Image (tube, rainbow, N blue to C red):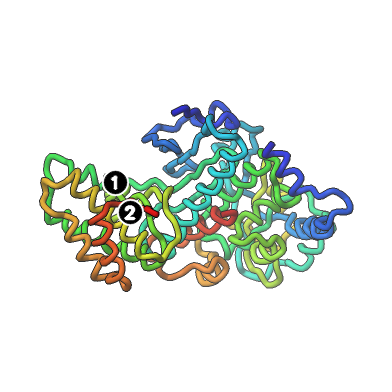
Amino acid sequence: MEASPDNTAADDFFEGCQLISQGAEARVWQTELLGRQAILKQRFNKKYRHPTLDTKLTNTRLKQEVRSLLKARKLGVMAPTVYLVDFKTRAIYMEHVAGKTMKEVLNAAEVDLAEVQGMLVKIGQAVAMLHDGGVVHGDLTTSNIIVRDNDQQVVLIDFGLSSNTSIAEDKGVDLYVLERAFTSAHSIHGNLFDKVLEAYKGSSRHWSSTLNRFAEVRMRGRKRLMVG
Amino acid sequence: MQRNLLHTKHCPRPGSRKLKSYKLRKLVSHLIFNAWPVLRVGRQACGTKAIYQDLLRDCSGKSQPSWSINSRELREQIVEGALEPEAAFIKASMVPDLFIIRLAAYQALLAHHNGSLTTRSLHSELLFNLSGSKHIAESLKKFGVSEGCSSLLVARFDAASNDGDQIATYVQGNLTPISGLSSCADPQAIKEAYKILPLELELGSLADAVCGRMSTRSC
């Protein structure tokens, strides 16, 4: 995939930035903003798209991500604070959360299972709060969950695929994606996802419809069959 | 292309319906141009990144809330555009943290750099950026000098070393060190202004919540 940093930005735009990861839509850098550690997420140009369409799509996604980040915080779910949104360079500056991703925690040489249990409960509660508030994360995987260093708090990141919805189907798919992440990569630790689901059930108001849907999704997979 | 879009959006041609509100905007932004203790903010030409690093090197202070400031005269002077050098006068009670001011200044510089200033000057843009709403007049009223406000924080871009003294003569009050800013803040008023929920405050500081509101205004 052709991807290059936005040319409208000055060459020194990324000076002092450290690349953390790169996906299909954006690059994530660690940088400093006005004396604070910050994360810079920049959505790069897609050369194969018509420029107008590209700008439009990018701006919509940028906005959606920022809205969801803010909404998550309003709902009491830990998510990075947004510092700055720059539409010109298609970048979001947000709070840098110091910690390990859930994936790193589970893949570490020594895993303290008792500690992990506590984290799983927090994940279940966070997802439930998010869903009750009408936000679906869209990409709940173990690498999008950070366990903060100082207080072991669970922080959800990457709301790039999030959407505002209160349909049980979407929430079910959200949970399904999370289950797949746990079962496919971390099954050596036993069935971790059950604990998440239990906590979800305990704190979500609409758990029954969501879990029914979740069972259905589990049977058929994430994608719906569209026949006829 | 993007620049053109912005240009047409913010500079209505004569005869267009937007012109009327534009004039109003100009007037309102004049209201804010006045000053007191100075945050020195360096405006470096462009290169997106370079701007910010020099943003805020030195802050001299703000006035003591010992008595009410001459806010009415100040406002009048601002309307006349009589105050020189121009600066942003911010209600200190609405500022939970200096980082907020830096962020607003940074955003203003960025808008200036992109040619997309919403208000008439950098200083009014700073004030406008502080607010979580898109309503200019309302933002300026809420965060700028208003009657009965007892402490002011004054910020100026590209401040020369004697600007502070000059600006200090416009305001009746005592200069106090910037470290006293936090004691001026009125958390209740801030929460009301930004509509911050108690749930959010459990996650982080008031300043964090305010950051989120400021930066997501355009979204």
Residue at the (36%, 64%) spot, across then down: A131
Which residue, as the protein is rendered here, is positioned at the far right? B15
The amino acid beneath tag 1 is: Gly
Q: Are marks 2 and 1 in contact (CB under 8 Å)?
A: yes
- Name the chain letter of the residue that bears numbered label 1: A
| Mark nearer the N terminus (2 vs 1) | 1
Provide the secondary structure element on which disc 1 rests.
Answer: strand
Provide residue B103's location: percent of width, then percent of height.
55, 49
Q: Which mark identifies residue A155?
A: 2
| Numbered disc 2: secondary structure | strand
Q: Which mark is residue A99?
A: 1
Q: Name the residue rendered at 48%, 44% in the picture.
A: A93
Mark 2 belongs to chain = A
Whether residue A150 is visible = no
Q: Does residue B111 sit above or below A51 in this rendering? A: below
Which x, y percent locates residue A60?
54, 49
Residue A200 or residue B104, whichever sits in front: A200
Above/below status of B59 relative to B214: above
Q: Give the total of numbered labels.
A: 2
Quarter of the image with the C terminus of chain A in it: bottom left
Residue A13: x and y in percent read 53, 31
Report the amino acid beneath label 2. Val
